[in-house]
Image (tube, rainbow, N blue to C red):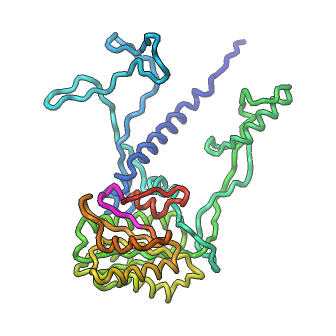
Amino acid sequence: MSVSQHDWSLHRKGQIDQERHKEKIREAIKKNLQEIVSEESIILSDGKKTVRVPIRSLEEYRFRYDPGRQTHAGQGDGKSRVGDVIAQEPRAGRGKKGEAGKDPGYDYYEAEISMEELSELIFEDLELPNLEQKRQQELQTDAVRFTDIRKHGPLTNLDKKRTILENMKRNATKGEPRFKDIKNEDLRFKVWEPTIRYESNAVVIAMMDVSGSMGEFEKYIARSFYFWMVRFLRTKYNNVHIVFISHHTEAKEVTEEEFFHKGESGGTQVSSAYELALQIIKERFNPHDWNIYPFHFSDGDNLPWDNDRCVQLVQQLIELCNIFGYGEIREGHYRSPSTLMSAYSRITDKKFVAVTISDKKEVYPALRKFFARRGDAVPAGR
């Protein structure tokens, strides 16, 4: 009779490689979120397409014959200190302009990711800020509740603390009460199930300047931000209310379709949007029952005599709302702040949050500044 011992880790090699592959994709996407979020093909899509992301190819560890062209060792002279570089691996070659490169480069391929997976990465640490307890609770949010501990389950649900305790208990029965030699019988897994948590009602009022001074770049940036904001709200929260307001010299409530696709022209009177927002709040959203979040995007080119009126209306909205978000879009970094933004500099209330966007890459930081958990908030704009 022959007895053999199998290395069962080899049977999991495919799964391990797959997990590494997925993690590599996640890392590449997270590094490129600023470019991906502002990608025009995504903003103009129906929200159901997949996204292609360039990722460096994965190579498994292997022995490779070195014909002597490269030296993979370094040697000090006895005077080296900690941190000194004594040798470096050769880097991938770059061809000079007008010449063909001789050194090998890196292989890249395009990975596809669904909009649902991309949204999960973008929204994983975002939330409605300053959400307060109100008299009525109708807003549903998805939550996860751990209900049991079992001996079998996926590694993603491994309960490390309980696993360590089980290992120490098993070793203690052998007279060695310490953590070592972990076995399958030590593993403990959490069992979870999705639940619905009810929170206080919330309404988001999206206001956008559609006057003649808003060029193609300004309108694209505003719609890009609101595209992801709406998707975030509907991904994270059930039954959240969104009110859409477009304005030039006059403001009107519009449908979501009109908000994202209908163009306007004319002059700019920002106060008209704020007055309509206050009217809608008074008629439909009692602050005692609702968490209220107004957001406004504009290029800041407002009638000069209207700026002081805007400051007064913003202060009135702040008294009723959880936060007030203002985004000013200025193409290029050479333009100075608008007279409207200068007027808003007098507002000192912490519930007033302002960002300036002058490049497509700044849409994602703006989204995070408005919606990141207050402990994780990051600066955006200037």
The residue depicted at 34 percent of the width and 10 percent of the height is 68
| Residue 181 found in image quarter | top right
Question: Is 72 located above or below residue 125 in the figure?
Answer: above
Residue 359 within the magenta-colored segment of the rendering: yes
Q: Relative to residue 103, is residue 229 drawn left or right?
A: right
Residue 139 percent across, percent down from the top left:
58, 73
Q: Relative to residue 182, is residue 365 drawn left or right?
A: left
| Number of marks drawn | 0
Residue 243 percent across, percent down from the top left:
44, 78
Question: Is 244 located above or below residue 55 in the figure?
Answer: below
Q: Relative to residue 200, is residue 283 drawn left or right?
A: left
Q: Residue furthest left?
A: 98
* Along the viewing direction, whichever of 255 and 281 lies nearer the viewer: 281
* Along the viewing direction, whichever of 93 and 154 lies nearer the viewer: 93
Quadrant where the C terminus is found in the figure: bottom left
Q: Residue furthest front?
A: 346
Residue 196 percent across, percent down from the top left:
63, 66
Q: Which residues are magenta?
A: 354-362
Q: Relative to residue 273, is residue 278 drawn left or right?
A: right
Residue 173 within the magenta-colored segment of the rendering: no
